[in-house]
Amino acid sequence: MQQLAIGSKYPEPSKKFRKKAALLSVIAMGLGQIYNRQYVKGFLLLAFYVYGIFTAVTSLPHALWALITLGETETHLQKVGRLYKQVMGDHSIFLMVESLITVFIMLVLIWLYIAGIKDAYRTGKLREEGVRPNTFKQTLSFVAAYRFPHIVLAIPLLGVVFFTVMPIIFMILVAFTDFTRETMPPAHLINWEGLQAFKELLRTKAWSHTFYSVTLWTFIWAFFATITGYFGGFAAALLVQSKGIRFRSFWRTAFILPFAIPMFVSTLIMRNIFNGQFGPVNQYLGMLGIAKAPWLSDPLWAKITLILVNFWLSFPVSMLMIIGILSTIPRDMYEAADIDGASGSQKTRLITFPMVMYSMAPLIIMQFVANINNFNIVYLLTNGKPLNGDFQFAGHTDILITWLFKLSMEQGKYNYASVIGIFIFIVLSVFAIWNVRRTKAFKEEDAS
């Protein structure tokens, strides 16, 4: 709505244009712009205003009713003559989604309404200063010249709102209901239950024991998966880039092969390789006279195997990025260190490692966050097994995201799964924002 005063001097005498324009926009969106003689913009805003009034009258009351009640009629049988006919009831989930969309549209229209008032006031002020308001064509030229990045960014932002923000809001709402497989609509209605799901998950002994144990293992898994992948890539990059190494291109290609293969294929192959009975690893160990290891059947061994397999799949990415960073470190820093008599380990510890960490820190943070949600490798390699009789629908190697999947897709505990989803969302958001703001690379960008 904002535009530059690119028009010529306006020959009108000074009047209180701003107040009249703003007041007219308060009465009806677009009237202020029409008053300021921006007719095309004014009629467009007026059309949005009419649509907003129509939506507020026809759809908003039903949306609010649906959001408050989640439906009032269950699917039931109704006797028609001598026969019973099934009458479909309200679908609580559909009502909730439709309500969210309607409320979101109304919020956008309210934002447009407020922006229209500000625009009318600002344009009226320009008229008081003797500046001619921009025409619609001039406004489009201004937007194309100065607001093009905003328009381009607005398109994916709209996708973020619809495909990320709204599902998150939906998940939060479901956590406050009794939505389970037993209350699946439209056969049943869903009811608001407040914090009941939170209390049962966090206070009931059976559920809380599972929740805290799975959460602890999730963070342990994410920590070791990130650290091993990073330092493995760092060591491989140093070795590949070291002086005097022959066939450097061959080593680079060989190490990147694990990354080139689709992850689910590699993971499924690994699951067979580490099979306790028929896997080739145990077969070779037996040929060497070494006892077979319960790679995937013992809780501790299964966790170690998960970290090993993740290391094998993740270190090539770190290696490639660190190789790129190593090429940007000024050589004169190493030459100055040589003059000072620094050893190879000292140069690595005082020059190479800090320089790499400076660039890699944001990526390491995001890898840690990604590993908390690393569903594929855990689900495909162990499926959360071995089973744990003390847990509620979770195994020894389940992390929060795989437990959430089992609760929702296998057990139909949608409200519990939503509570876990909210917990994951809060932890990851707070952790990521807090750490990214502390990263020197981002501080450097903010200061520039």
Image (tube, rainbow, N blue to C red):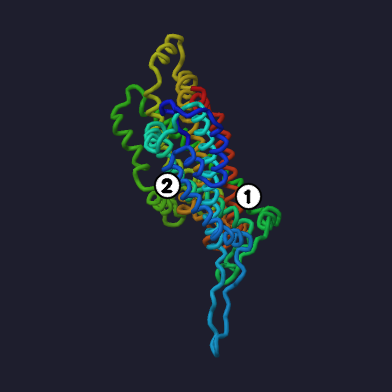
Structural distance between the alpha carbons of marks 2 and 1: 37 Å
Q: Is residue 323 left or right of residue 85?
A: left
Q: Quadrant of residue 193?
A: bottom right
Q: Is residue 114 above or below residue 205?
A: above
Q: Nearer the viewer, mark 2 or mark 1?
A: 1
Marking on residue 213: 1
Q: Is residue 231 left or right of residue 407?
A: left
Callout 2 amino acid = Leu
Q: Residue at x 42, y 15 (%)?
A: 333
Q: Tell me where residue 119 appears, x and y as whole percent.
A: 51, 37
Residue beneath disc 2: 288
Q: Secondary structure at mark 2?
A: loop
Of labels 2 and 1, earlier in sequence is 1
Q: Tell me where residue 77 appears, x and y as whole percent.
A: 57, 80
Considering every residue shown, the one lying at the far top of the view is 339
Q: Is residue 196 left or right of residue 19?
A: right
Q: Is residue 443 above or below residue 74?
A: above
Viewer-closest of 87 and 276:
87
Q: Tell me where residue 70 appears, x and y as whole percent.
A: 60, 63
Number of other residues with Cα within 10 Å of mark 2, as a class: few under 14, some 14 to 19, many 20 or more: few
Residue 385 seen in this snapshot: no
Callout 1 amino acid = Ser
